[in-house]
Image (cartoon, rainbow, N blue to C red):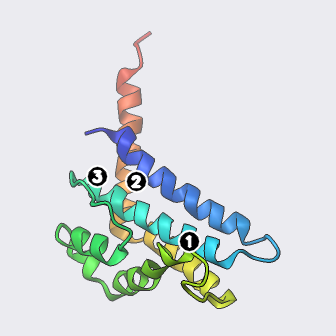
Amino acid sequence: MDYEYIAEWFQFGDMDLETAEYIQGKRPQPLEIICFHCQQAAEKFLKGYLVGIGEIPPKTHDLRLLRKLCEQHNSHFANSNIVNVCENLTPYGVPTRYPDEIEIRDTDVTRALRAAKSVERFEPIWKAFEELRESAEAEVIEDEPEL
């Protein structure tokens, strides 16, 4: 298993989430861009989970579809919270990149940030990320030359 490739998915998700949080402090707030990065973070966390279990994620921005693919491998993805989060974040994937496609308010930004963080912290995803990190650390220890 290519741990580095799987880890990259999670790292890119973290970068999107950190970007969204960083630009939240900009005035005026770029609402669409913040929400877009939240959707992108969630997308990468879901795709990272799929890659980690040996699936090739489809090229899609539809978090509902990605969640359903994850659910085929883990019934926890049928949990109503993750279902609702994916439903709410999906519209920020494409329409936010174009003018006049979607109307976003300040409250949407707060919800989008909370939603993206909840995907990152969703138990199966978080557990997969932690197992990946532990495996990578174990590989580093095994590769170290004995003194």
How far apart are labels 1 and 3 at the CA level?
29 Å
Of label 2 and label 3, which has the lower sequence position?
3
In the displayed structure, does residue 40 sit left or right of residue 81?
Answer: right
Q: Is residue 48 above or below residue 39?
A: above
Q: Residues within 10 Å of mark 2 (few under 14, many from 20)?
A: few
Q: Quadrant of residue 58?
A: bottom left
Instruction: Please name the residue that numbered disc 2 is placed on.
Output: 130
Q: Which mark is residue 97?
A: 1
Q: Which mark is residue 38?
A: none
Dot 1 lies on which element? helix
Dot 2 lies on which element? helix
Instruction: Please name the residue that numbered disc 3 is placed on.
Output: 52
Dot 3 lies on which element? helix
Residue extending furthest top?
A: 147
How far apart are labels 2 and 3 at the CA level?
12 Å
In the displayed structure, does residue 104 sit left or right of residue 127?
Answer: right
Q: Amino acid at mark 2?
A: Glu
Q: Residues within 10 Å of mark 3 (few under 14, many from 20)?
A: many
